[in-house]
Amino acid sequence: MSFKDVNLSFMKKLLFILAISVLVLQGCSKPSESPDASVPTGSARPELASYNYLVELPAHIQQALITVDNSPATNPITNNGATLGRVLFYDKNLSLNRTVSCGSCHKQAAAFDDDVALSKGFANARTTRNSMSLLNIRFYKSGRMFWDERVPTVEKQALQPIQNPLEMGLTLTELESRVKSLTYYPDLFQKAFGSPVIDSVRIAKALAQFERSIVSYQSKYDKVKQGLETFTAAESRGEQIFLTAPNPGPGGGGIACAGCHTPPMFITSTPAGGFAFPLESGINGQNRFKSGSLRNIATRKFLFHAGTIADLNAMFTGPQPVPAHGVPPQDVAAMIAFLNTLTDTAITQDPKYSDPFR
Ligand code: HEC
Ligand code: HEC
């Protein structure tokens, strides 16, 4: 081995060690606020028009809302409150490295759900459960949020993803100073709450108002219930099975779909029964979970809490039967036809729910 060879291999080793240490240092250093990170990077400002978030709902929905609304008297929806909530919902400055907003995992085009089984947080790590659609959360009477209902209200839920080390990664103190540092907020807080004071309680309230305003009421199903359109024969048959036919299968035997997915929003916090999912810790540590609204379900991908069921087709005909979710083969097409009538394409395009930063 010549001197040159030794030297080269020594240099190679040195470079290798250097490269590894750089990687290790980067990997281990806990993502911390660099001085620059506290200064807004993008000069993006939200583009806002004035929208009405207090629409009059059709009678069949309004009647249901009266009995199941989880809005607290201390935080009714106002147009200015929901407008502020919309800005916060889409503001990527609310995540540690300013790359992720609520809207990243709750995409309007995907019915405020994500279009992947497990979502990516600010550092590209995956969430442990499937994202949930935010359609009609106002109709979940108990107000309890998450698949395992671990949070008691929509307001309390709103600050969780921001502090989640994998999703958005801020502390409440960091959140408040971020929002205070952005020039467009004081005016929005002034309009929403009557003074420019910015704190996490107000942030949570505004987010909750925006979320509760996301109500779907313009699907074919709604037009039929208002006497404006009629179901096809298959859709009618599907509705009949949904409302009346007891489901076979372990855990949910004898309960029709509607007992757990109650019309007109296809959601209830008091289901007629529960069903067991093996080896998973859900509500109260038991292996059961909540279900959000089934509206727009036919367009949603990756269903159930783990996101393991690809879509409706896979749910009814796939190799992994879901407990309490069987439909006889001859009725599958009708059931899917009916569930398709729950799709509201107005809400997935309405500019008042869209990202104001683009
Ligand atoms: C990195 C992806 C991600 C981000 C960012 C995110 N969420 Fe979520 N969201 C999820 C996942 C995953 C769940 C289900 C988690 C669980 O149940 O454990 C969820 C659940 C929810 C629920 C519960 C719905 C229900 O019916 O129980 C609400 C409400 C919600 N998110 C609102 C928000 C808000 C508001 C923000 C922004 C402040 C936000 N999310 C940011 C992924 C995300
Ligand atoms: C005993 C109560 C119960 C019955 C009966 C029931 N479901 Fe469900 N359903 C649930 C629960 C709870 C979940 C969420 C479970 C989970 O993710 O672990 C769910 C989830 C779903 C989902 C996926 C929702 C999503 O957001 O990913 C669809 C679709 C669905 N149900 C349709 C139906 C249909 C159609 C029927 C009738 C054939 C039916 N369900 C009967 C309780 C029920």
Image (cartoon, rainbow, N blue to C red):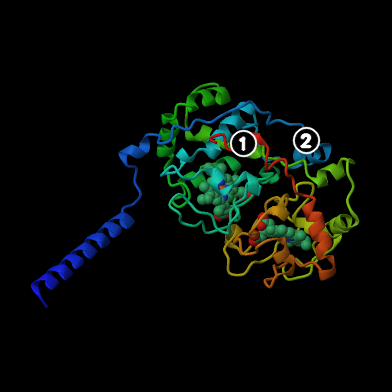
- The residue closer to the viewer here, 190 or 66, is 190
Horizontal relation, residue 97 to residue 87: left or right: left
Q: Looking at the rendering, which quadrant does residue 98 occupy?
A: top left
Label 1 residue near ligand 1, CB within 8 Å: no
Kind of residue indicated by mark 1? Phe
The quarter of the picture showing ligand 2: bottom right
User: Does 112 sit above or below residue 298?
Assistant: above
Q: Nearer the viewer, residue 46 or 6?
A: 6
Please tell me which residue is depicted at 78% across the width and 53% down the height of the picture: 340
Is 45 left, or right, of 340 in this rendering?
left
Q: Is residue 43 left or right of residue 26?
A: right
Whether residue 206 can be seen here? no
- Density class for disc 2 (Cα within 10 Å; few <14, some 14-19, many ≥20) is some
Question: Residue 31: x, y in percent?
Answer: 35, 49
Residue 179 seen from this side:
yes
Residue at label 1?
Answer: 210
What residue is at 70 percent from the left and 41 percent from the top?
A: 347
